[in-house]
Image (spheres, rainbow, N blue to C red):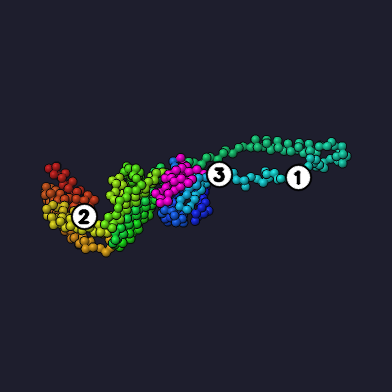
Amino acid sequence: MYRVHVIVEEGPDRGKEINIPEEGARFGRSSKNDVVLADPLLSRFHCRFSFQDDGRLCITDLGSSNETLLNDVATQSAALSPGDRVVIGDTCLKILHNGVAETPVADAKSVPIAAIPSAGAPSPPTNVDLDFSSATDRQRAPAGGGQRFFLWGFATVAIVLMVVLVLRPQKPPPPAPPIVPPPVGQPTRSDRLEIEYEKVSASPDNIFRYAMLLDAKGILSIDLNDLEGGRHIHKESKQPIERDVLDSLRRDLEGTGFFELQDRYAGLPRDSMHDTWDLSITIGSRVHRTTVANRLEPEIFKNARDFIEEFGKNELALPAIALPTARLIELAEEAVQRGQKLYNERTVRHGNLFRAIKHFRETEFLLETVEPKPESYRLALAARAECERELQTKYEHFLFLAEKAISLRDWEVSAANLRIIQELIPERTDSRYKKTYAKLIDVERRLMDE
């Protein structure tokens, strides 16, 4: 059960009550935040409320422009107490509760009305006459006799009730509810991983923007905008990324030393070019953000960025999406040239034809998101089709020779032709490779038996 952790005391959202979930909540202007506030002085991603390992609520600034103030003092990260005030932009947040869960407390409304004495209620009469005696007896009876009779009767009833309660079999107390472990794969506060990454490259002719977001639930999304190349791409994972994949990425990022970097590394724009990398990583309760602008990236930053870009490309199956269109076209043309060179040398080595096909496929992969397709794309499609036809013809030719030799029990000739097929198609996952490999094992066994 959750209490109201935070209330907005001042600002456009005044009066808004906010519960912080166990996985924490990010505040800011962007619609991608967990809590979106209408304050124009907030940064897009301003701060984050989360819980420490001991369950206490804390605040972390996410590199905001106008800082995060705790009780009028700028802070990067601090634990919170009830009554603290956090100021972000023109918004003042008051901390009402700083723990994850609450223990239900007794409500005054649950107290029976009969148990609460009313002010000014008349006292019960001291003499109670049950009309069991005659008028003469009532005249002779000493004062207080009726009261004593009433008290004796009340005591008798109370004793009977006590005996019944003592002798009645007692029901066993209800069993304690079982302790339910967290769901398998559910991240804890200590291994939570969140990433916000944005790369912008601007020139007089083009603006290229690549942004990746991995939220606290493990959902990954990538946005790409390339004005010159006409690419506008948004892709998002339908399910949370698998826990073991996130754990591996988290270990890689921790090993880079990213949390030791400065907040900003800046240089001067050159040749009207403006390049910016902005990376924020949250691991457990640690949050760090570094911006690199118009200069070479520090090696530590580049290593972390490479891990993140490769992770995004692999998980969402996006081909080199983080590269501008001009660079993709350049790489594609180089791949076509390598493929054509290998095709021309296909008689030098049996495997060159297969390697040429891989380079032509690489060209198609690089240009998948580029529109309109350049000439290199058409060349790659045509060359790959021709290579695959020729490869299949050679495969069938050498397989025929191998099977013919097997029928003649000429094991050496059969083995030689099967080995040529293995060179032609070196990919072990290819069905043609698997088929000839099984034949070759059998033929070589027969050669050893002779």
Mark 3 sits on what residue? 104
Q: Secondary structure at mark 3?
A: loop
The structure residue drawn at horizontal position 28% and vertical position 57%, both measured from the top left corner, is 273
The amino acid at mark 1 is Pro
The structure residue drawn at horizontal position 79% and vertical position 38%, both measured from the top left corner, is 147
Count residues near mark 3 (Cα–Cα under 10 Å), then give few for <14, some for 14-19, many for 20+.
Answer: few
Cα separation, mark 2 vs mark 1, equals: 100 Å
Mark 2 sits on what residue? 358
Q: Is residue 285 left or right of residue 172?
A: left
Q: Nearer the viewer, mark 2 or mark 1?
A: 1
Query: Which label is found at residue 122?
Result: 1
The magenta region covers 54-82
Lower sequence index among marks 2 and 1: 1
Q: Nearer the viewer, residue 31 or 171?
A: 31
Q: Secondary structure at mark 1?
A: loop
The amino acid at mark 2 is Lys
Residue 132: image x %, image y %?
82, 41
Cα separation, mark 3 vs mark 2, equals: 65 Å
Can residue 182 be seen here? The reply is: no
Lower sequence index among marks 3 and 1: 3
